[in-house]
Image: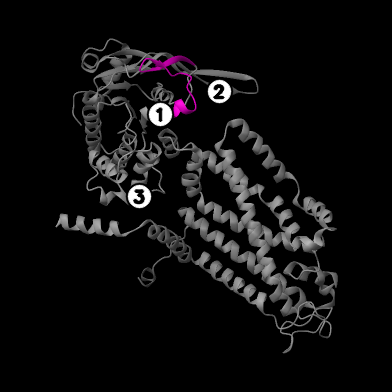
Protein backbone atom coordinates (compact mmCIF):
# COMPACT_ATOMS: atom_id res chain seq x y z
CA UNK A 1 0.00 0.00 0.00
CA UNK A 2 1.19 3.50 -0.83
CA UNK A 3 1.83 6.18 1.71
CA UNK A 4 -0.76 8.93 2.10
CA UNK A 5 1.88 11.44 3.03
CA UNK A 6 5.64 11.22 3.22
CA UNK A 7 8.28 13.75 4.14
CA UNK A 8 11.84 13.67 2.90
CA UNK A 9 14.57 15.39 4.92
CA UNK A 10 12.16 18.06 6.11
CA UNK A 11 14.02 20.93 7.79
CA UNK A 12 12.69 24.13 9.32
CA UNK A 13 14.79 26.98 10.61
CA UNK A 14 13.48 30.00 12.47
CA UNK A 15 15.41 33.24 12.34
CA UNK A 16 15.69 35.53 15.30
CA UNK A 17 17.30 38.94 15.17
CA UNK A 18 19.94 39.97 17.63
CA UNK A 19 20.81 43.64 17.51
CA UNK A 20 20.86 45.31 14.12
CA UNK A 21 22.70 42.84 11.94
CA UNK A 22 23.06 39.59 13.83
CA UNK A 23 20.69 36.80 12.86
CA UNK A 24 20.69 33.56 14.78
CA UNK A 25 19.04 30.52 13.30
CA UNK A 26 17.18 28.00 15.38
CA UNK A 27 16.62 24.57 13.91
CA UNK A 28 13.12 23.46 14.84
CA UNK A 29 13.15 20.43 12.54
CA UNK A 30 16.24 18.61 11.33
CA UNK A 31 15.95 16.16 8.42
CA UNK A 32 12.68 14.63 9.49
CA UNK A 33 11.42 11.63 7.53
CA UNK A 34 7.96 10.40 8.44
CA UNK A 35 5.27 8.57 6.54
CA UNK A 36 1.60 7.82 7.07
CA UNK A 37 -0.45 5.03 5.52
CA UNK A 38 -4.23 4.96 5.14
CA UNK A 39 -6.20 3.48 8.01
CA UNK A 40 -3.42 4.02 10.50
CA UNK A 41 -2.70 6.21 13.52
CA UNK A 42 0.87 7.39 13.78
CA UNK A 43 2.06 8.98 16.99
CA UNK A 44 4.62 11.76 17.18
CA UNK A 45 6.02 11.93 20.68
CA UNK A 46 8.35 14.44 22.20
CA UNK A 47 8.80 16.99 24.94
CA UNK A 48 7.83 20.66 24.62
CA UNK A 49 9.97 22.41 22.04
CA UNK A 50 10.90 19.26 20.19
CA UNK A 51 9.24 20.48 17.01
CA UNK A 52 6.01 18.50 17.07
CA UNK A 53 3.67 21.41 16.45
CA UNK A 54 6.04 22.92 13.87
CA UNK A 55 5.85 19.67 11.94
CA UNK A 56 2.04 19.74 12.09
CA UNK A 57 1.90 23.33 10.88
CA UNK A 58 4.28 22.58 7.99
CA UNK A 59 2.12 19.65 6.90
CA UNK A 60 -0.97 21.89 6.67
CA UNK A 61 1.10 24.69 5.07
CA UNK A 62 0.69 27.25 7.83
CA UNK A 63 4.52 27.35 7.85
CA UNK A 64 6.84 26.92 4.92
CA UNK A 65 9.64 24.42 5.24
CA UNK A 66 13.23 25.62 4.81
CA UNK A 67 14.28 22.54 2.86
CA UNK A 68 13.12 19.01 2.24
CA UNK A 69 10.16 17.63 0.39
CA UNK A 70 6.60 16.61 1.15
CA UNK A 71 4.85 13.95 -0.93
CA UNK A 72 1.10 13.48 -0.95
CA UNK A 73 0.28 10.15 -2.61
CA UNK A 74 3.70 10.17 -4.34
CA UNK A 75 3.11 13.65 -5.71
CA UNK A 76 5.56 16.36 -4.76
CA UNK A 77 3.55 19.10 -3.08
CA UNK A 78 6.36 21.05 -1.43
CA UNK A 79 5.85 24.18 -3.52
CA UNK A 80 2.12 24.19 -4.22
CA UNK A 81 0.13 27.38 -3.82
CA UNK A 82 -3.14 28.99 -4.85
CA UNK A 83 -5.82 26.63 -6.12
CA UNK A 84 -3.88 23.40 -5.74
CA UNK A 85 -3.10 24.36 -2.14
CA UNK A 86 -6.80 24.81 -1.46
CA UNK A 87 -7.49 21.43 -3.04
CA UNK A 88 -4.78 19.81 -0.92
CA UNK A 89 -6.07 21.42 2.25
CA UNK A 90 -9.40 19.67 1.74
CA UNK A 91 -7.55 16.38 2.04
CA UNK A 92 -5.55 17.20 5.14
CA UNK A 93 -7.10 18.78 8.20
CA UNK A 94 -5.86 19.62 11.65
CA UNK A 95 -7.42 19.42 15.09
CA UNK A 96 -6.05 22.07 17.40
CA UNK A 97 -4.86 21.62 20.94
CA UNK A 98 -7.16 24.11 22.62
CA UNK A 99 -10.87 23.56 21.90
CA UNK A 100 -11.59 26.79 23.78
CA UNK A 101 -9.69 28.78 21.13
CA UNK A 102 -10.36 26.84 17.95
CA UNK A 103 -14.11 27.56 17.79
CA UNK A 104 -15.34 31.04 16.97
CA UNK A 105 -17.15 32.30 20.10
CA UNK A 106 -19.56 34.39 18.02
CA UNK A 107 -21.00 31.57 15.93
CA UNK A 108 -23.28 28.66 16.70
CA UNK A 109 -22.19 25.04 16.54
CA UNK A 110 -24.33 24.49 13.46
CA UNK A 111 -22.45 27.29 11.68
CA UNK A 112 -19.12 25.64 12.39
CA UNK A 113 -20.20 22.42 10.70
CA UNK A 114 -22.16 24.09 7.92
CA UNK A 115 -19.38 26.34 6.62
CA UNK A 116 -17.04 23.58 5.36
CA UNK A 117 -20.02 21.88 3.68
CA UNK A 118 -20.96 25.11 1.91
CA UNK A 119 -17.37 25.85 0.92
CA UNK A 120 -16.81 22.38 -0.53
CA UNK A 121 -20.16 22.61 -2.40
CA UNK A 122 -21.62 19.53 -0.77
CA UNK A 123 -24.07 17.98 -3.24
CA UNK A 124 -26.57 16.30 -0.90
CA UNK A 125 -28.88 17.74 1.71
CA UNK A 126 -26.75 19.88 3.99
CA UNK A 127 -29.03 19.64 7.03
CA UNK A 128 -29.06 15.85 6.85
CA UNK A 129 -25.29 15.77 6.53
CA UNK A 130 -24.92 18.00 9.61
CA UNK A 131 -27.12 15.62 11.61
CA UNK A 132 -25.13 12.65 10.33
CA UNK A 133 -21.82 14.24 11.32
CA UNK A 134 -23.08 15.24 14.75
CA UNK A 135 -24.35 11.74 15.35
CA UNK A 136 -20.98 10.35 14.29
CA UNK A 137 -19.14 12.42 16.90
CA UNK A 138 -21.86 11.53 19.42
CA UNK A 139 -23.37 14.96 19.83
CA UNK A 140 -26.88 13.54 20.21
CA UNK A 141 -29.55 14.62 19.72
CA UNK A 142 -28.15 17.10 17.18
CA UNK A 143 -31.09 19.49 17.57
CA UNK A 144 -30.21 20.28 21.16
CA UNK A 145 -26.66 21.28 20.21
CA UNK A 146 -27.13 23.02 16.87
CA UNK A 147 -28.13 26.44 18.14
CA UNK A 148 -25.78 26.47 21.11
CA UNK A 149 -22.68 28.59 21.17
CA UNK A 150 -19.22 27.21 21.98
CA UNK A 151 -19.23 28.68 25.50
CA UNK A 152 -22.40 26.75 26.29
CA UNK A 153 -20.85 23.29 25.86
CA UNK A 154 -18.01 21.51 27.65
CA UNK A 155 -14.42 21.18 26.47
CA UNK A 156 -14.88 17.57 25.33
CA UNK A 157 -17.98 18.51 23.38
CA UNK A 158 -16.15 21.41 21.79
CA UNK A 159 -13.43 19.08 20.60
CA UNK A 160 -16.12 16.81 19.07
CA UNK A 161 -17.71 19.79 17.36
CA UNK A 162 -14.33 20.62 15.93
CA UNK A 163 -13.79 17.05 14.75
CA UNK A 164 -17.23 17.12 13.09
CA UNK A 165 -16.19 20.39 11.40
CA UNK A 166 -13.08 18.89 9.86
CA UNK A 167 -14.81 15.61 8.96
CA UNK A 168 -17.35 17.62 6.96
CA UNK A 169 -14.64 18.10 4.33
CA UNK A 170 -14.05 14.34 4.00
CA UNK A 171 -10.29 14.61 4.52
CA UNK A 172 -7.92 11.69 3.98
CA UNK A 173 -5.50 12.80 6.65
CA UNK A 174 -6.19 14.22 10.09
CA UNK A 175 -3.48 15.83 12.16
CA UNK A 176 -4.39 15.91 15.82
CA UNK A 177 -2.10 18.29 17.69
CA UNK A 178 -2.44 17.26 21.34
CA UNK A 179 -6.22 17.00 21.01
CA UNK A 180 -6.80 15.82 24.56
CA UNK A 181 -4.15 17.67 26.56
CA UNK A 182 -6.54 20.50 27.45
CA UNK A 183 -9.34 18.15 28.42
CA UNK A 184 -10.42 16.72 31.70
CA UNK A 185 -8.87 13.26 32.19
CA UNK A 186 -12.31 11.66 32.34
CA UNK A 187 -13.20 13.06 28.92
CA UNK A 188 -9.99 12.08 27.15
CA UNK A 189 -11.02 8.47 26.61
CA UNK A 190 -14.13 9.57 24.67
CA UNK A 191 -12.17 11.75 22.27
CA UNK A 192 -9.54 9.04 21.79
CA UNK A 193 -12.27 6.47 21.11
CA UNK A 194 -13.68 8.88 18.57
CA UNK A 195 -10.29 9.06 16.82
CA UNK A 196 -10.15 5.25 16.69
CA UNK A 197 -13.70 5.14 15.33
CA UNK A 198 -12.85 7.66 12.62
CA UNK A 199 -9.84 5.58 11.63
CA UNK A 200 -11.76 2.31 11.51
CA UNK A 201 -14.96 3.51 9.87
CA UNK A 202 -13.69 6.14 7.46
CA UNK A 203 -10.20 4.80 6.85
CA UNK A 204 -8.61 8.16 7.56
CA UNK A 205 -4.92 8.27 8.35
CA UNK A 206 -4.30 10.14 11.60
CA UNK A 207 -1.12 11.78 12.85
CA UNK A 208 -1.47 11.97 16.61
CA UNK A 209 0.89 14.45 18.25
CA UNK A 210 1.38 14.29 21.98
CA UNK A 211 3.76 14.38 24.91
CA UNK A 212 1.64 11.91 26.82
CA UNK A 213 2.88 8.33 26.47
CA UNK A 214 -0.18 6.90 28.19
CA UNK A 215 -2.55 7.98 25.45
CA UNK A 216 -0.04 7.02 22.76
CA UNK A 217 -0.12 3.39 23.83
CA UNK A 218 -3.90 3.38 23.56
CA UNK A 219 -4.46 4.59 20.02
CA UNK A 220 -1.33 4.54 17.88
CA UNK A 221 0.02 1.83 15.62
CA UNK A 222 3.49 3.31 15.08
CA UNK A 223 5.32 6.16 16.77
CA UNK A 224 8.13 8.57 15.98
CA UNK A 225 10.07 10.00 18.89
CA UNK A 226 11.19 13.58 18.27
CA UNK A 227 14.01 15.17 20.20
CA UNK A 228 15.34 18.66 19.40
CA UNK A 229 13.83 18.47 15.93
CA UNK A 230 15.29 15.08 15.08
CA UNK A 231 13.57 11.72 14.86
CA UNK A 232 15.57 9.68 17.32
CA UNK A 233 13.53 6.51 17.13
CA UNK A 234 10.63 5.08 15.19
CA UNK A 235 8.75 1.80 14.92
CA UNK A 236 5.75 -0.06 16.23
CA UNK A 237 4.34 1.34 19.43
CA UNK A 238 4.61 -1.86 21.42
CA UNK A 239 8.18 -2.54 20.35
CA UNK A 240 9.36 0.93 21.30
CA UNK A 241 7.54 1.13 24.59
CA UNK A 242 8.76 -2.30 25.72
CA UNK A 243 12.33 -2.13 24.45
CA UNK A 244 13.41 1.44 23.73
CA UNK A 245 16.81 1.79 22.06
CA UNK A 246 17.56 5.50 22.26
CA UNK A 247 18.57 7.15 25.52
CA UNK A 248 16.02 9.93 25.15
CA UNK A 249 13.16 7.50 24.58
CA UNK A 250 14.25 5.59 27.67
CA UNK A 251 14.18 8.77 29.73
CA UNK A 252 10.77 9.67 28.33
CA UNK A 253 9.33 6.29 29.22
CA UNK A 254 10.98 6.43 32.63
CA UNK A 255 9.24 9.76 33.27
CA UNK A 256 5.79 8.46 32.36
CA UNK A 257 4.15 6.61 35.20
CA UNK A 258 3.01 3.53 33.33
CA UNK A 259 2.60 3.47 29.56
CA UNK A 260 0.15 0.56 29.68
CA UNK A 261 -2.05 2.02 32.34
CA UNK A 262 -5.38 2.90 30.82
CA UNK A 263 -6.55 6.33 31.78
CA UNK B 1 -39.33 12.16 30.57
CA UNK B 2 -36.08 12.77 28.80
CA UNK B 3 -37.60 12.05 25.42
CA UNK B 4 -40.32 14.52 26.12
CA UNK B 5 -37.95 17.31 26.97
CA UNK B 6 -35.96 16.53 23.84
CA UNK B 7 -39.10 16.76 21.77
CA UNK B 8 -39.89 20.11 23.30
CA UNK B 9 -36.45 21.37 22.51
CA UNK B 10 -36.88 20.21 18.93
CA UNK B 11 -40.06 22.21 18.56
CA UNK B 12 -38.48 25.31 19.99
CA UNK B 13 -35.52 25.14 17.64
CA UNK B 14 -37.70 24.47 14.62
CA UNK B 15 -39.73 27.54 15.37
CA UNK B 16 -36.85 29.91 15.84
CA UNK B 17 -35.86 31.27 12.45
CA UNK B 18 -32.73 33.10 11.47
CA UNK B 19 -34.30 36.55 11.44
CA UNK B 20 -35.62 35.99 14.93
CA UNK B 21 -32.15 35.12 16.16
CA UNK B 22 -30.81 38.30 14.54
CA UNK B 23 -33.36 40.63 16.09
CA UNK B 24 -32.77 39.00 19.44
CA UNK B 25 -29.05 39.74 19.06
CA UNK B 26 -29.80 43.43 18.49
CA UNK B 27 -32.27 43.42 21.36
CA UNK B 28 -29.82 41.82 23.76
CA UNK B 29 -27.06 44.28 22.78
CA UNK B 30 -29.42 47.19 23.41
CA UNK B 31 -30.54 45.47 26.61
CA UNK B 32 -27.01 45.19 27.99
CA UNK B 33 -26.36 48.78 26.91
CA UNK B 34 -29.35 49.95 28.92
CA UNK B 35 -28.55 47.78 31.93
CA UNK B 36 -25.38 49.75 32.51
CA UNK B 37 -26.13 52.99 34.35
CA UNK B 38 -23.49 55.05 32.57
CA UNK B 39 -24.45 54.04 29.06
CA UNK B 40 -28.12 54.31 29.97
CA UNK B 41 -27.65 57.95 31.01
CA UNK B 42 -25.61 58.62 27.89
CA UNK B 43 -28.22 56.97 25.69
CA UNK B 44 -31.08 59.01 27.16
CA UNK B 45 -29.07 62.24 26.89
CA UNK B 46 -28.18 61.54 23.27
CA UNK B 47 -31.76 60.64 22.48
CA UNK B 48 -33.05 63.91 23.95
CA UNK B 49 -30.44 65.94 22.05
CA UNK B 50 -31.47 64.18 18.84
CA UNK B 51 -35.14 64.91 19.57
CA UNK B 52 -34.21 68.54 20.21
CA UNK B 53 -32.45 68.72 16.84
CA UNK B 54 -35.35 67.07 14.99
CA UNK B 55 -37.76 69.63 16.46
CA UNK B 56 -35.32 72.30 15.32
CA UNK B 57 -35.51 71.14 11.70
CA UNK B 58 -39.27 71.81 11.52
CA UNK B 59 -39.88 74.54 14.06
CA UNK B 60 -38.17 77.48 15.65
CA UNK B 61 -39.91 80.38 17.45
CA UNK B 62 -38.36 83.00 15.17
CA UNK B 63 -36.21 83.06 12.09
CA UNK B 64 -32.70 82.55 13.50
CA UNK B 65 -31.09 84.63 10.75
CA UNK B 66 -33.34 87.70 11.03
CA UNK B 67 -32.39 90.66 13.19
CA UNK B 68 -35.79 91.10 14.81
CA UNK B 69 -35.04 92.29 18.34
CA UNK B 70 -33.10 94.76 20.41
CA UNK B 71 -29.46 93.75 20.68
CA UNK B 72 -28.04 91.85 23.65
CA UNK B 73 -31.22 91.39 25.64
CA UNK B 74 -30.95 89.07 28.65
CA UNK B 75 -33.40 86.10 28.81
CA UNK B 76 -37.04 87.21 29.07
CA UNK B 77 -40.53 85.98 28.24
CA UNK B 78 -40.27 86.84 24.51
CA UNK B 79 -36.71 85.59 23.97
CA UNK B 80 -36.28 82.52 26.18
CA UNK B 81 -32.48 82.72 26.03
CA UNK B 82 -32.16 86.40 25.26
CA UNK B 83 -30.89 87.93 22.02
CA UNK B 84 -27.52 88.11 20.35
CA UNK B 85 -25.40 91.20 19.96
CA UNK B 86 -26.87 91.54 16.47
CA UNK B 87 -30.49 91.18 17.55
CA UNK B 88 -31.21 87.51 16.74
CA UNK B 89 -33.09 85.12 19.03
CA UNK B 90 -30.56 82.83 20.78
CA UNK B 91 -33.03 80.01 21.44
CA UNK B 92 -34.07 79.88 17.78
CA UNK B 93 -30.43 79.71 16.74
CA UNK B 94 -29.76 76.96 19.27
CA UNK B 95 -32.75 74.95 18.05
CA UNK B 96 -31.99 75.40 14.35
CA UNK B 97 -28.26 74.82 14.80
CA UNK B 98 -28.64 71.45 16.52
CA UNK B 99 -29.39 69.35 13.43
CA UNK B 100 -26.35 70.41 11.33
CA UNK B 101 -24.06 69.97 14.33
CA UNK B 102 -25.32 66.44 15.00
CA UNK B 103 -25.37 65.64 11.29
CA UNK B 104 -21.73 66.59 10.92
CA UNK B 105 -20.74 64.77 14.11
CA UNK B 106 -22.34 61.49 13.03
CA UNK B 107 -21.31 61.73 9.37
CA UNK B 108 -17.71 62.23 10.43
CA UNK B 109 -18.11 59.37 12.90
CA UNK B 110 -19.55 57.06 10.25
CA UNK B 111 -17.12 57.89 7.45
CA UNK B 112 -14.09 58.00 9.76
CA UNK B 113 -14.96 54.63 11.26
CA UNK B 114 -15.62 53.12 7.83
CA UNK B 115 -12.19 54.18 6.52
CA UNK B 116 -10.54 53.13 9.77
CA UNK B 117 -12.13 49.67 9.65
CA UNK B 118 -11.28 49.12 5.98
CA UNK B 119 -7.67 50.30 6.24
CA UNK B 120 -7.05 48.77 9.68
CA UNK B 121 -8.38 45.30 8.93
CA UNK B 122 -6.74 45.22 5.51
CA UNK B 123 -3.39 46.16 7.07
CA UNK B 124 -3.75 43.51 9.74
CA UNK B 125 -4.64 40.77 7.30
CA UNK B 126 -2.12 41.20 4.46
CA UNK B 127 1.53 40.37 4.05
CA UNK B 128 4.17 41.81 6.33
CA UNK B 129 5.48 44.33 3.77
CA UNK B 130 2.04 45.74 2.89
CA UNK B 131 1.27 45.95 6.57
CA UNK B 132 4.46 47.95 7.19
CA UNK B 133 3.73 50.33 4.30
CA UNK B 134 0.16 50.98 5.46
CA UNK B 135 1.43 51.42 9.00
CA UNK B 136 3.80 54.17 7.89
CA UNK B 137 0.93 55.79 5.98
CA UNK B 138 -1.30 55.71 9.09
CA UNK B 139 1.49 57.10 11.24
CA UNK B 140 2.02 60.01 8.85
CA UNK B 141 -1.64 60.97 9.24
CA UNK B 142 -1.36 60.59 13.00
CA UNK B 143 1.71 62.79 13.24
CA UNK B 144 0.56 65.66 10.97
CA UNK B 145 -1.01 68.23 13.27
CA UNK B 146 -4.74 68.34 12.56
CA UNK B 147 -4.94 72.09 13.12
CA UNK B 148 -2.54 72.74 10.29
CA UNK B 149 -4.49 70.57 7.86
CA UNK B 150 -7.74 72.17 8.93
CA UNK B 151 -6.38 75.71 8.34
CA UNK B 152 -4.87 74.65 5.02
CA UNK B 153 -7.93 72.87 3.63
CA UNK B 154 -10.23 75.46 5.15
CA UNK B 155 -8.60 78.37 3.39
CA UNK B 156 -8.37 76.34 0.17
CA UNK B 157 -12.11 75.64 0.22
CA UNK B 158 -12.92 79.27 1.15
CA UNK B 159 -13.54 80.28 -2.47
CA UNK B 160 -15.69 77.37 -3.61
CA UNK B 161 -17.34 76.69 -0.28
CA UNK B 162 -20.67 78.46 -0.90
CA UNK B 163 -22.21 75.80 -3.12
CA UNK B 164 -20.73 72.86 -1.23
CA UNK B 165 -22.47 73.45 2.09
CA UNK B 166 -20.96 71.37 4.88
CA UNK B 167 -19.08 69.00 2.56
CA UNK B 168 -15.60 70.61 2.92
CA UNK B 169 -15.92 70.61 6.71
CA UNK B 170 -16.81 66.92 6.72
CA UNK B 171 -13.97 66.05 4.32
CA UNK B 172 -11.42 67.90 6.44
CA UNK B 173 -12.60 66.26 9.65
CA UNK B 174 -12.65 62.75 8.15
CA UNK B 175 -9.14 63.20 6.74
CA UNK B 176 -7.77 64.29 10.10
CA UNK B 177 -9.85 61.89 12.18
CA UNK B 178 -9.62 58.38 10.72
CA UNK B 179 -6.00 57.45 11.51
CA UNK B 180 -6.37 56.82 15.22
CA UNK B 181 -9.10 54.24 14.71
CA UNK B 182 -7.22 52.60 11.85
CA UNK B 183 -4.25 52.01 14.12
CA UNK B 184 -6.47 50.45 16.77
CA UNK B 185 -8.15 48.13 14.26
CA UNK B 186 -4.84 47.19 12.71
CA UNK B 187 -3.36 46.01 15.99
CA UNK B 188 -6.53 44.18 17.04
CA UNK B 189 -6.74 42.41 13.68
CA UNK B 190 -3.09 41.41 13.95
CA UNK B 191 -3.80 39.66 17.23
CA UNK B 192 -7.08 38.03 16.12
CA UNK B 193 -5.60 36.66 12.89
CA UNK B 194 -3.16 34.55 14.90
CA UNK B 195 -5.89 32.92 16.97
CA UNK B 196 -6.82 29.30 16.35
CA UNK B 197 -10.34 29.93 15.14
CA UNK B 198 -9.10 32.09 12.27
CA UNK B 199 -6.34 29.58 11.41
CA UNK B 200 -9.03 26.91 11.44
CA UNK B 201 -11.13 28.86 8.95
CA UNK B 202 -8.09 29.31 6.70
CA UNK B 203 -7.51 25.55 6.77
CA UNK B 204 -11.19 24.83 6.09
CA UNK B 205 -10.84 26.94 2.96
CA UNK B 206 -12.75 30.11 3.84
CA UNK B 207 -11.92 33.09 1.65
CA UNK B 208 -10.25 36.10 3.23
CA UNK B 209 -13.27 38.33 2.71
CA UNK B 210 -15.51 35.77 4.37
CA UNK B 211 -13.18 35.58 7.37
CA UNK B 212 -13.03 39.37 7.65
CA UNK B 213 -16.79 39.91 7.39
CA UNK B 214 -18.02 36.85 9.27
CA UNK B 215 -15.42 36.51 11.99
CA UNK B 216 -13.09 39.47 12.50
CA UNK B 217 -15.74 42.20 12.13
CA UNK B 218 -17.98 40.28 14.48
CA UNK B 219 -15.27 39.94 17.10
CA UNK B 220 -14.36 43.64 17.09
CA UNK B 221 -17.93 44.98 16.85
CA UNK B 222 -17.91 46.65 20.32
CA UNK B 223 -14.68 48.43 19.39
CA UNK B 224 -16.12 49.54 16.05
CA UNK B 225 -19.15 51.03 17.83
CA UNK B 226 -16.94 52.65 20.45
CA UNK B 227 -14.73 54.07 17.71
CA UNK B 228 -17.82 55.47 16.01
CA UNK B 229 -18.75 57.38 19.18
CA UNK B 230 -15.19 58.56 19.61
CA UNK B 231 -14.91 59.81 16.03
CA UNK B 232 -18.35 61.45 16.29
CA UNK B 233 -17.05 63.29 19.32
CA UNK B 234 -14.08 64.41 17.29
CA UNK B 235 -16.52 65.52 14.57
CA UNK B 236 -18.56 67.72 16.92
CA UNK B 237 -15.45 69.11 18.51
CA UNK B 238 -13.78 69.65 15.14
CA UNK B 239 -16.80 71.51 13.76
CA UNK B 240 -16.72 73.91 16.69
CA UNK B 241 -13.02 74.31 16.20
CA UNK B 242 -13.26 74.96 12.46
CA UNK B 243 -16.05 77.47 12.90
CA UNK B 244 -14.21 79.11 15.78
CA UNK B 245 -11.15 79.57 13.61
CA UNK B 246 -13.38 81.04 10.95
CA UNK B 247 -12.25 78.68 8.19
CA UNK B 248 -15.72 77.18 7.82
CA UNK B 249 -18.80 78.86 6.38
CA UNK B 250 -19.79 81.35 9.06
CA UNK B 251 -23.11 82.15 7.40
CA UNK B 252 -24.54 78.74 8.30
CA UNK B 253 -26.30 78.33 11.63
CA UNK B 254 -24.81 75.73 13.95
CA UNK B 255 -23.40 75.64 17.46
CA UNK B 256 -19.91 76.30 16.14
CA UNK B 257 -20.84 79.48 14.26
CA UNK B 258 -22.88 80.66 17.26
CA UNK B 259 -19.70 80.56 19.28
CA UNK B 260 -17.76 82.22 16.46
CA UNK B 261 -20.12 85.22 16.36
CA UNK B 262 -20.34 85.41 20.13
CA UNK B 263 -16.59 85.57 20.39
CA UNK B 264 -16.38 87.95 17.45
CA UNK B 265 -18.73 90.28 19.32
CA UNK B 266 -16.61 89.81 22.45
CA UNK B 267 -19.61 88.52 24.34
CA UNK B 268 -17.37 87.39 27.19
CA UNK B 269 -16.30 91.00 27.77
CA UNK B 270 -19.70 92.62 27.35
CA UNK B 271 -21.25 90.16 29.79
CA UNK B 272 -23.77 88.60 27.42
CA UNK B 273 -23.37 85.16 29.01
CA UNK B 274 -26.72 83.95 27.57
CA UNK B 275 -25.13 84.03 24.16
CA UNK B 276 -21.98 82.02 24.95
CA UNK B 277 -23.26 79.54 27.49
CA UNK B 278 -26.13 77.75 25.62
CA UNK B 279 -24.07 76.50 22.67
CA UNK B 280 -21.13 75.65 24.95
CA UNK B 281 -23.37 73.67 27.29
CA UNK B 282 -25.10 71.86 24.43
CA UNK B 283 -21.77 70.85 22.89
CA UNK B 284 -20.52 69.70 26.29
CA UNK B 285 -23.70 67.68 26.84
CA UNK B 286 -23.32 66.04 23.42
CA UNK B 287 -19.71 65.13 24.24
CA UNK B 288 -20.67 63.93 27.65
CA UNK B 289 -23.41 61.65 26.34
CA UNK B 290 -21.00 60.09 23.82
CA UNK B 291 -18.35 59.64 26.51
CA UNK B 292 -20.85 57.96 28.81
CA UNK B 293 -21.93 55.61 26.03
CA UNK B 294 -18.29 54.76 25.44
CA UNK B 295 -17.70 54.06 29.13
CA UNK B 296 -20.66 51.73 29.17
CA UNK B 297 -19.34 49.90 26.09
CA UNK B 298 -15.92 49.58 27.72
CA UNK B 299 -17.46 47.91 30.71
CA UNK B 300 -19.42 45.59 28.44
CA UNK B 301 -16.36 44.54 26.50
CA UNK B 302 -14.05 44.30 29.50
CA UNK B 303 -15.73 42.71 32.52
CA UNK B 304 -12.82 43.60 34.82
CA UNK B 305 -13.89 47.28 34.64
CA UNK B 306 -17.33 46.47 35.95
CA UNK B 307 -18.24 47.70 39.41
CA UNK B 308 -20.65 45.34 41.06
CA UNK B 309 -23.31 46.84 43.26
CA UNK B 310 -23.55 45.56 46.78
CA UNK B 311 -27.00 44.37 47.58
CA UNK B 312 -29.00 46.43 50.03
CA UNK B 313 -29.38 43.39 52.23
CA UNK B 314 -25.70 43.53 53.09
CA UNK B 315 -26.02 47.04 54.45
CA UNK B 316 -28.73 46.10 56.89
CA UNK B 317 -26.82 43.18 58.29
The single residue placed furthest to the front in the displayed view is: A123
Q: Position of residue A113 (x, y in %)?
A: 34, 42
Chain to which mark 2 belongs: A
Q: Quadrant of the C terminus of chain B?
A: bottom left
Between tags 1 and 2, which lies in front? 1
* Residue A89 numbered mark, or none: 1
Determine whether B46 is above or below A205 in the image: below
Could you tell me which chain the residue with mark 3 belongs to? A
Give percent across and percent down for residue B205.
43, 35
Sooner in the amino-acid sequence: mark 1 or mark 2: 2
Question: Horizontal placement of B221 versus A236: left or right?
Answer: right
* Disc nearer the start of the sequence (1/3): 1
Give the residues drawn in magenta, as a range: A67-87
Q: Residue at left 85%, top 58%?
A: B159
Q: Label 2: which residue? A: A16
* CA distance separating discs 1 and 3: 26 Å
Q: Residue at x 48, y 42 (%)?
A: B210
Q: Which part of the image, by quadrant, shows the N terminus of chain B?
A: bottom left
| Rendering colour mode | one colour
Q: Is residue A75 magenta?
A: yes
Relative to B255, A153 lies left or right: left
Mark 1 chain? A
In the depicted structure, whether residue B263 falls above or below residue A82: below
**Which residue is drawn at the image coordinates 22% and 46% (left, top)?**
A140
- Camera-near label (2 vs 3) is 3
- Residue B261 image point, x, y percent: 82, 71
The residue carrying mark 3 is A149
Other residues around mark 3 within 10 Å, as few (<14) / some (14–19) / many (≥20): some
Amino acid sequence: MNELIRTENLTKEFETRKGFTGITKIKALDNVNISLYPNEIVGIVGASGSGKSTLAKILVFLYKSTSGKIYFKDEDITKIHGKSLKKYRKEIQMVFQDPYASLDPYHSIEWHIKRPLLISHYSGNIDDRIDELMNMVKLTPPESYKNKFPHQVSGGQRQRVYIARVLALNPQILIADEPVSMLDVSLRIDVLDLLLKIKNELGIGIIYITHDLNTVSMVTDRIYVLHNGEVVEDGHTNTILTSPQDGYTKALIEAASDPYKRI
Amino acid sequence: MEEKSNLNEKNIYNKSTKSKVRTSVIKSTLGTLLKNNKSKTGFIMLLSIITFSIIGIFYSPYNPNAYLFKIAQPPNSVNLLGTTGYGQDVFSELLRGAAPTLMIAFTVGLLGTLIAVLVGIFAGFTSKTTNAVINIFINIFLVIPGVLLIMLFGTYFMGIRQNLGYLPTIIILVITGWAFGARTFRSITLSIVKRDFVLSSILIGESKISIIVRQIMRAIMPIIVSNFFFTSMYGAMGLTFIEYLGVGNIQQVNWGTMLYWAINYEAYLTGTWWWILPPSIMISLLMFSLILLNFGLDEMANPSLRVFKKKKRDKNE
